[in-house]
Amino acid sequence: MKTTIDQVAKYVGEEVTIGAWLANKRSSGKIAFLQLRDGTGFFQGVVVKAAVSEEVFQLAKSVTQESSLYVTGTVAEDTRSPFGYELQVTNIEVIHEAIDYPITPKEHGTEFLMDHRHLWLRSKKQHAIMKIRNEIIRSTYEFFNENGYTKIDPPILTGSSAEGTTELFHTQYFDEEAYLSQSGQLYMEAAAMAFGKVFSFGPTFRAEKSKTRRHLIEFWMIEPEMAFMDHEESLQVQEQYVSHVVQSVLKNCKLELNTLERDVEKLEKIQAPFPRISYDDAVTLLKEQGFDDIEWGEDFGAPHETAIAESFDKPVFITNYPAEIKAFYMKPDPNRPEVVLCADLIAPEGYGEVIGGSQRIDDLALMEQRYQEHNLTGEAYQWYLELRKYGSVPHSGFGLGLERTVAWIAGVDHVRETIPFPRLLNRLYP
Ligand code: 4AD
Ligand code: MG
């Protein structure tokens, strides 16, 4: 019976054949332990000298790391491994022999591993991170589909900027200038006026020259946008969505979290509602904690966010930032126009901002004024202004960065390991 590692529990006591690669091996005179992987999982094949032909045992001892194989054997329970099963090998057939696989079981530097990202993805840790990423994607679709949202895909090539002009990738679009999208938000606002509740999920591009463990040049963003929802209602969507994703990973990625040695007790606490702190109170809190450098009106940096997050064991919303330091489309607080109806969601444990969201300006005159103030004029913006001309409604939305969310949930230090092929300031290869 040909099967895969994730299915072996069904075949205890039976003989199966698995197409696999040799991740690692250990052997002595009488026994060889083959660490097998097939993409669906990792488990051990045990080759006992006395139980197989001399030829098979010699093969088990000599087969090289990352060679591809068909391995046949009897599935047995193995209470010592977290996976719970192993294969008592009866036969090995080599499909292709790998020679001098560069990533050996010894330690390698990060730059070396990043240069070999196309191979590094095969390792157990990277496999676990990508499986968690996949579960976050799956449960994201599940959440929004079950809550009445329509997925709408905004364009990637755009004629205008969504978040500010300094971070754009320019490209030639026949005889026009175009940009790679930094956010689909403006298009999602149009979509919300057509479909009510919408979400997008796609790649976005930032040409900012940031070299931190939280910044990628190309990253994936989930951007829901909701007509007839104010900012408070949007915060409730956010906390329910994030809780759903974390609980789904806890339920469906037990082995992967175990491989990564993630402290799951910290994740178990992630249940809506989440605490909220105003920007004003956050400034006060920081001053109390000895951050003398921060003044009202300044944006928070990573150390500030981490310090604020440390006061809570759930993600925390920092709300109502000064209008000055936020995007032009955010709606001013009617009682206090110097701040806007917005929030950043800061993950616990120092993983930083995972969501930026706000209620949007729905008044045409105010939006036109903001455009003037930001020197954003011209034809490229006409369509966005028209959304405020024909049946404008209160509406809110947010953007969740996939890679920062993976980093937090999987407990990975740097976002470069949370996307299959990271685009970084100094890296476009492989
Ligand atoms: O806060 P940002 O810039 O918000 C927007 O783009 C809004 N238009 C979203 C919206 O309201 N529809 O980005 C949203 C999130 C951040 O909180 C962060 O998680 C992630 O996107 N992000 C990045 N992730 C990796 N690398 C970068 N360079 C990122 N920039 C933002
Ligand atoms: Mg932001």
Image (cartoon, grey):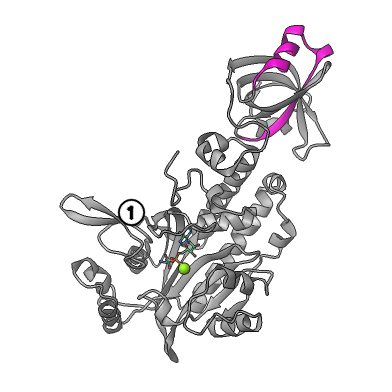
Instruction: Kindly give the residue lying farthest to the bottom in the view shown.
Output: 335
Residue of label 1: 156
Residue at image point 59% right, 69% down: 303
Q: Quick check: 241 left or right of 250?
A: left
Q: Is residue 174 visible?
A: yes
Packing grade of label 1 (10 A; few <14, some 14-19, many >=20) is some
Q: Secondary structure at mark 1?
A: loop
Magenta-span inclusion, residue 26: no
Front residue (pair 413, 35):
413
The residue nearer to you, when weighing 55 against 273, is 55
Residue 64 at what x, y percent from top left? 64, 20
- Residue at 64% from the left image edge and 42% from the top image edge: 125
Q: Position of residue 333 (x, y in %)?
A: 44, 86
Quarter the N terminus occupies: top right
Q: Which residue is situated farthest in the left direction here?
A: 175
Above or below, 304 against 46 in this view is below
53 in the magenta segment: yes
Q: Is mark 1 within 8 Å of ligand 1?
A: no
Q: Which quadrant of the render holds ligand 1?
A: bottom left
State the image quarter where residue 2 is shown. top right
| Residue 9 drawn at (x, y percent) | 73, 33
On screen, 288 above or below 310? below
Q: Which residues are magenta?
A: 40-64
Amino acid type, residue under disc 1 in the picture: Ile
Instruction: Give percent across and percent down for residue 46.
Output: 77, 23
Q: Quadrant of residue 16?
A: top right
Image quarter where the C terminus lies is top left
Q: Residue at x 81, y 14 (%)?
A: 49
